[in-house]
Image: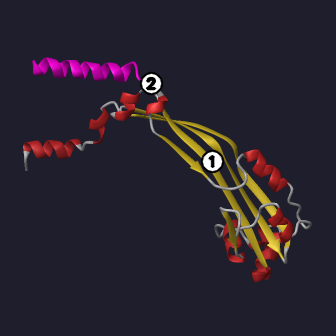
Amino acid sequence: MKNKFYSLLGLSILALIFTGCKSTSYLPSNKTTTFCQWDTYNTAMESYQEIEVNVTTIAELKDMGYDPYKSPNLKILTYLDVMREFMPNSSIKKEDLPYTVRRCIEDHEQCYAYLLSIENMNKQREGNVVSDLFGFRKNTRIEGWTFQAIIIINNGLVVYKISSGQPKVTKYKKVSNPLGPLQSINVSSSVKSVLGP
């Protein structure tokens, strides 16, 4: 009777694995959000484009929301940090940099920068709940956007700016383990434990 019960249970699990239970509501999800006043890539880019080199002052930057003491996730960079950002390795010389960036490095404490880094990512597992639960198949959809900007300020005036990012991120990650939970077991160790030294 017990053998029949376990056989039916095994068949039921296999049926669930290869057929039904495809609702994503039962699968784990993960969301990464950078808290700031810009909730989309477009709003972040539009705000960045309002900054004018050699025109926008530090006071005007604060009015636009670029205030590291009030706006979260806005980092202050010293001239040494600026060097590391623009010269990450020895193959890049100071002479290779834009003039205003070189001037910032040479002016030392008179110059600093703001680094804005925004990441909004949503990771949602999709597919069969039982397959995911037992580790046979894990399918993850990743969607979101990223935005980064460096704004260099020298003597209270914006002298250089540069931005990068991805307006739309869409990725699909598939992990397949034919043996399911047995995949992570160290076979050689298991054999040794059975056979002995």
Circle 1 residue:
120
In this rendered view, identify the residue nearer to me: 91 or 169.
169
Determine which of the numbered discs, if any, sits on residue 92 in the image: none
Question: Percent from the top left, x then y, of residue 177?
Answer: 36, 34
Residue 117 magenta-highlighted: no
Task: Identify the amino acid type marked 2.
Answer: Lys
Residue 3 in the figure: left or right of residue 32:
left
Check whether the beta carbons of the residues at disc 2 and disc 1 lie within 8 A of each other. Answer: no
Disc 2 marks which residue? 22
Label 2, secondary structure: give it: loop
Mark 2 and mark 1 lie on one chain; the one further toward the N terminus is 2
**What percent of the width, then of the height, locates residue 10?**
23, 22
Q: Main structural element of the magenta stretch: helix, strand or loop? A: helix
Question: Which residue lies at the image location 72% right of the left edge and 46% below the top edge?
Answer: 40
Q: Label 2: how many residues lie within 10 Å, few (<14), some (14-19) or many (20+)?
A: some
Q: Separation of disc 2 and disc 1 at Cα?
A: 26 Å
Residue type of the residue flagged with mark 1: Asn
Q: Most extreme residue toward the left, as rendered?
A: 196
Dot 1: few (<14), some (14–19), or many (≥20) neighbours within 10 Å? Answer: some
Secondary structure found at label 1? strand
Examine the rendering and report whether any part of residue 158 can be seen: no
For the magenta stretch, what is the residue range? 1-22
Q: Residue at x 18, y 46 (%)?
A: 189
Rendered residue at 11%/21% (across/down): 2
Q: Is 2 left, or right, of 146 in this rendering?
A: left
Q: Position of residue 181 (x, y in %)?
A: 29, 36
Please determine whether, in this image, residue 51 is positioned above or below residue 134: below
Q: Quadrant of residue 137?
A: top left
**Can residue 84 be seen here?**
yes
